[in-house]
Amino acid sequence: MAAILAIGAGALDLGLLAVTLTLPRALFAWLGGGWVDRHRRRPVLIGSDLVRAAALLAIPAAAYLGMLSMPLLYLIAAITGVATVLFELADHVFIADLVGREQLLDANGKREAVDAVAEISGPALGGALVAWLTAPIAIAADAATFVGSALLIARIRKHEEIVATATASSFIEDVRIGIHVVWRDPAIRALFVSAATMTLFGSFMASLYTLFALRDLGLAPTELGIAIGCGGIGALVGATMASRAAARFGPRRTLIGSLALGAAMQVLIPLAPPIPWIAMTFLIATQVIGDGVLTVYLVNETTLRQRLLPPEALGRAAGTFHVANGLLTPIGALVGAVLAEAIGIRPTLWLLAIGYALALASLIVARQAFPVEAPLPAKLDPKAATG
């Protein structure tokens, strides 16, 4: 919103902004994954929060001084991108330390429920703040939340298990282990292919959704915030249902069924007409139902990865997923921006539904690799650890 409303950014500008926000995933994910496998994760979480807070505060400061520009937003996006990937990698491992691998499904579901509550209120409040204070000033409130997060994480008192101190001594070895542990298991491999496919096509929406809603559909910032916030309702329901779905249907049917319904809901976005109140209905339906079932998928996908992957290489395996995300997101954002300029935003967004269907196909093809019931936690292959 800051780029669109304060600077007048177009589709290509937003595509480049998405690139600078996500490309650091590819540049730092394996390095960060090796670090969090061999060091305490809590300091990484706290430091990442504080760096993001400082970077975001530069936006309202620049706006006040009349210096806000797209190059500055690109720089801030790159800094926050690096800090975010380090936070996510550390968080992925830290939660296993906190609750143990046997309780991961329940813990991941509860954490997604908390995120959903934030999603219900956050975007709507953000849209109102943008309308009231302008987008750059509203970002100051976003920066404050990272400071709050750092203070809360600092209060956690829990011993961290460091089990990978001798498993690798070089960046190249970290990369090799990260790729090996992901690709050797057919279930994890299928999840990786599915995630990569959704990332590539989903990045079309990441760079175009706001522009499509504000310009093509005629929604006001507050209306867009409300629509996105409604996704939190669906995500909250999905988070509470994730463990029950896995217990009733098993990981295999839960993953395939939830992704199938989530893929079907993506067609409502390009179908939305340029009549604001009707468009809101379409977007809210996508947010509520789509976010709900995709949260069920995400909770079970994350838990399955944490349980099947060896604890000694959990950070590096997560780094492999982040590298794919970091490479494919900017590619998809740029391709989506170019296509939007050439054929229009609405036709480009149809490719989102196609991409989710392809991701579903990858799971269906590999369905026999997924466990029918919850698997036992894995151990590290000594060959993968020592090379």
Image: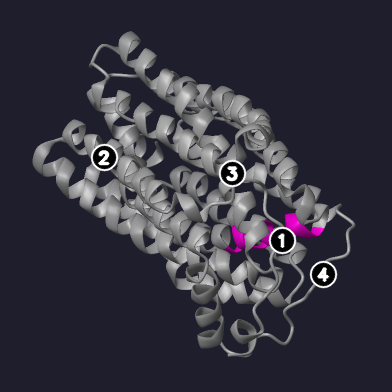
Q: Nearer the viewer, mark 2 or mark 3?
A: 3
Counting from the top left corner in percent of width and height, residue 15 is at 29, 50
Colouring mode (rainbow / by chain / secondary structure / one colour)? one colour
* 10 Å crowding of disc 2: few (<14), some (14-19), many (20+): some
Q: Which residue is mark 1?
A: 377
Q: Describe the element under mark 4 as helix, strand or loop.
A: loop
Q: Nearer the viewer, mark 3 or mark 4?
A: 3
Q: CA distance from mark 2 to mark 1?
A: 34 Å
Give yes or no for contact between labels 2 and 3 (Cβ–Cβ under 8 Å).
no
**Magenta highlight range:** 86-97
Q: Earlier in the sequence, mark 2 or mark 3?
A: 3
Q: Which residue is mark 3?
A: 251
Amino acid bearing label 4: Glu
Q: Nearer the viewer, mark 2 or mark 1?
A: 1
Give yes or no for contact between labels 2 and 1 (Cβ–Cβ under 8 Å).
no
Give yes or no for contact between labels 3 and 4 (Cβ–Cβ under 8 Å).
no
Q: Quadrant of residue 47?
A: bottom right
Q: CA distance from mark 3 to mark 1?
A: 14 Å
Can residue 225 be seen in the rendering of this structure?
no
Q: Describe the element under mark 2 as helix, strand or loop.
A: helix
Q: Which residue is mark 4?
A: 161
